[in-house]
Image (cartoon, grey):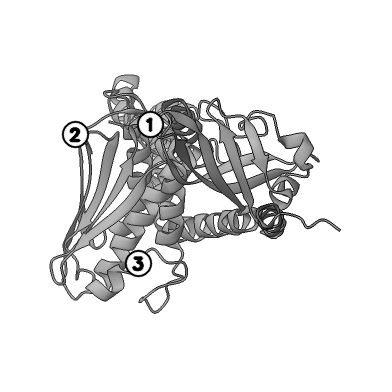
């Protein structure tokens, strides 16, 4: 009986091991076609190895090809560059959407020529769905935090409208009874009606800002949105509660038009303002200062900052501040900053924090240049 060469046995053993790894391990050609994938990797999307091998790497991608993530992947494939761990949506054979976290690196020959790529993809669908549930939960908690303030914001102009209409009714009664002439009634009724119209416009602005949160929240469609509008919405919603403790300043040096969903970015800004408010509540100081600003960054799209003059964040806390369920607040949930970090990461950006104990904190939201459709775009919100 002839013996199988030891090299062939080793190769067979290696393939058998790879087939049992609970992740997709694959090799691509230089033109990004699949030349090898392990059995368990192909089965993640419900296919056999034979159905995957020979096809294009991007054939089963459900992510919009013009999204920042897919543009970055396509650029890396075309340029023969590495892609770090990135979440990509795939379409399962049965139609379900999957989330896989992928990374791949180029394979080059002895003279530097591109031979192909080697990659790994891990199914993170359950993790992504769990984070989505956290996002929904945090959205409700954040809006609940500002509900009382919003109620006051709507109740005040509504009461003004009611008062104005009562005054106009009395003016009309005086006119009808002959107690006053039409000129007197008109001279007093006109400014009263002007006040009522201003109050109605105030209510309309609050409703519009709430619509910013709802618009696009249940859709992946990205419509152009002015950063100034999102900032206006966030500061309007957060303002009533926050202004009880602090002076709120807005300074937008950058007014870009962004390609992003409205609701997630507005929620991020609301979360950062809520975090500042909670930090300020813990101090004995009567009045504080909170600032929201934006600026263009060299090599980046835009940076949005939220800074406060509160107690600051100790170094040991800063190391865990974006961890889910980590909180130092007595009634905190520990998901606001974690959710915000995840939402910004999905946009291709990141959040960082700078703080010194006793001297406040500054959170920076970095959005990539792929999100910027126009560097300057002033709107009614700016």
Q: Which residue is mark 3?
A: 321
CB atoms at circles 2 and 1 under 8 Å apart? Answer: no
Say which mark, if any, is on residue 112: 1
Residue 226 in the image: above or below residue 244:
above
Disc nearer the start of the sequence (2/1): 1
Residue 132: % across, % down: 58, 53
308 relative position to 215: left or right: left
Residue wearing tag 2 = 253
Task: Give x and y (percent) for residue 348.
Answer: 41, 41
**Residue at disc 1, secondary structure:** loop
Q: CA distance from mark 2 to mark 3?
A: 28 Å
Give the secondary structure at mark 3.
Answer: loop
In percent of width and height, residue 262 lies at: 46, 37
> Is 72 placed above or below 187 here?
below
Q: Nearer the viewer, mark 2 or mark 1?
A: 1
Mark 2 in CB contact with mark 3 (< 8 angstroms): no
Q: How many marks?
A: 3
| Quarter where residue 251 is shown | top left
Place of residue 42 in the rendered image (x, y in percent of width and height, measured from the top left): 72, 45
Q: Is 306 in front, or is 153?
A: 306
Quadrant where the N terminus is found in the figure: bottom right
At label 3, counting other C-alpha atoms closer than 10 Å, the crowd grade (few under 14, some 14-19, many 20 or more) is many
* Mark closest to the chain's N terminus, 2 or 3: 2
Mark 1 or mark 3, whichever is nearer to me:
1
- Name the outermost residue toward the left: 359
- The residue that appears at 24% across and 33% down in the rendered structure is 299
Viewer can see residue 283: yes
């Amino acid at each position: 009986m002839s013996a199988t060469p030891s090299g062939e046995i080793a190769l067979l053993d290696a393939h058998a091991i790879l087939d049992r790894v609970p992740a997709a391990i694959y090799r691509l050609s230089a033109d990004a076609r699949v030349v090898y994938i392990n059995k368990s990797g192909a089965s993640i999307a419900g296919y056999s190895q034979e159905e995957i091998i020979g096809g294009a790497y991007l054939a089963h991608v459900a992510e919009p090809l013009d999204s920042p993530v897919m543009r970055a992947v396509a650029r890396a494939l075309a340029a023969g560059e590495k892609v770090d761990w990135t979440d990509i949506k795939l379409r399962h054979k049965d139609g379900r959407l999957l989330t896989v976290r992928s990374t791949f690196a180029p394979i080059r020959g002895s003279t530097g020529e591109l031979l192909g790529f080697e990659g790994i993809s891990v199914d993170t669908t359950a993790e992504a769905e769990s984070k989505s549930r956290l996002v929904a939960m945090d959205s409700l908690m954040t809006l609940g935090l500002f509900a009382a303030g919003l109620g006051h914001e709507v109740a005040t102009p509504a009461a003004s409208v009611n008062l104005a209409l009562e005054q106009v009714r009395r003016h009309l009664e005086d006119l009808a009874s002959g107690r006053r002439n039409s000129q007197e009634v008109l001279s007093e009724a006109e400014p009263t009606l002007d006040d009522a119209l201003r109050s109605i416009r105030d209510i309309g602005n609050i409703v519009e800002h709430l619509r910013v949160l709802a618009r696009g929240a249940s859709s992946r469609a990205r419509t152009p949105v002015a950063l100034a509008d999102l900032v206006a919405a966030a500061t309007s919603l957060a303002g009533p509660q926050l202004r009880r403790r602090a002076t709120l300043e807005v300074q937008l040096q950058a007014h870009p038009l962004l390609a992003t969903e409205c609701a997630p970015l507005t929620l991020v800004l609301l979360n950062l303002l809520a975090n500042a408010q909670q930090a300020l509540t813990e101090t004995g100081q009567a009045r504080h200062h909170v600032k929201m600003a934006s600026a263009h960054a060299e090599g980046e799209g835009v940076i949005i900052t939220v800074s406060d003059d509160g107690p600051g964040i100790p170094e040991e806390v800063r190391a865990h501040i974006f961890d889910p369920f980590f909180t130092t607040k007595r009634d905190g949930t520990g998901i606001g900053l974690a959710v915000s970090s995840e939402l910004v990461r999905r946009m291709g950006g990141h959040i960082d924090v700078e703080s010194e104990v006793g001297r406040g904190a500054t959170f920076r939201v970095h959005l990539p240049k792929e999100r910027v459709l126009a560097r300057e775009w002033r709107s009614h919100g700016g």
